[in-house]
Image (cartoon, rainbow, N blue to C red):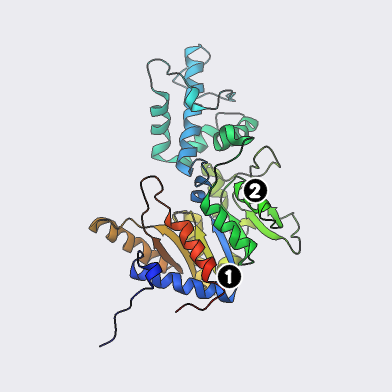
Amino acid sequence: MSRPWIPPEELASFDRHSASRLLRLLRIFQSQPIVLVLGAGVSASSGLPSWNELMEKICQVFVYHWQFDIASGRATAARPPKNLSVVFTDPEEFADLEGHDIHVLGEGFARGNPVLAAQQIKNCIRDLDWIWLLRKCLYGEANSTPIHHSPLIDRLGALCAEGCVHAVVNYNYDSVFEESLLTKGVRFKVLFDAEQPIRSGFLPIYHVHGYLKRGGGPKTRIVLAENDYHEDLVAPYSWSNLLQSSFLMRSACIFVGTSMTDPNLRRLLRSAFAVGKSFHYAFLPSTSGSLKGAMLDALFDEDLQALGVSSIRYPSGTAADPHAWLPRSVDWLLEHRKNSYP
């Protein structure tokens, strides 16, 4: 009879599969640099809105302005506005109009299909106001003030400073991760289109969905509304698709802070795995506190495995910090990457 596999004491809080995969990931860190792939959860750890929260804010701002124009006699409920001017951007300052709760209306608008809602709103406001609105909803007052300290961003930045990472694919629009790298003395180059040259000796950070630098910066294409995603889906040879495909086929990618449900990413993973057979890892929160949660996690993880991605389910933290185990996991990799582990 074979001995049961017992995880190291430091990984006892992980389930057996996740502990085993974390050990395999450690061996990859010890042998080769990886590609770090960052999702919205990374930026949210610093106090910025999650993707859903960002969409709700955008919808709240739009609903408020439309209803304000209706109350002022400049618009009607029967026809959406054209070239709407967006002036107020902080939903916390909105007063209810016509007896309606603007927050509830905005949340309801975003809940059905956020990408479609973004497209509908983008159709109704001026192009310049669209970018301005995204920046304001993303950063709020933090556009020129310090961001909350994030242990996760700090530890991911430490991976880059230690030379564990040879490229970063950042699905976020913000510049918070780059700001953390500056404090660690990491030389990097932000890239958001095919025309920019790659600089030798600099860590390339690819913002494949666009870039909105805090405090102001270059104007880039932003992938947020339905048409933006459709353009990516129907253009397999676009810069962002070719870049992601190349990394997925030739490198070990570590996904952090992403739900792994984006249809374009899943399409790219499926195509890359059929060609390159590279294996990747995704840190995901565990929802297995119940039978239903365990079953849903297992179903999702089995599907990801077919795309060449192994899930590392980190345990639930506290109510105040449910993702506390995520930076701890990254710290564990950093601590043991230079030493053999039993």
Residue lying at 39% horizontally and 73% vertically, measured from the top left: 8
Residue 91 lies left or right of residue 196; in this view the side is left
Q: Is residue 215 above or below residue 160?
A: above
Q: Which residue is at 40% across, 73% downward?
A: 20
x then y, percent, for residue 25: 49, 71
Q: Residue at x 59, y 25 (%)?
A: 83
**In front of the other: label 1 or label 2?**
2
Of 12 and 228, nearer the camera is: 12
Mark yes or no: residue 165 visible. yes
In the figure, 243 relative to 173: above or below?
below
Up the image or down, 152 lies above or below 9; here it is: above
SS class of the residue under badge 2? helix
Mark 1, residues whose alpha carbon is within 10 Å: few (<14), some, or many (≥20)? Answer: some
Q: Which amino acid does label 1 sit on?
A: Ser
Residue 271 on image: x %, y %: 51, 67
Q: Which of 133 and 315 is in front in this view?
A: 315
Image mark for residue 251: 1
Which residue is label 2 attached to?
179
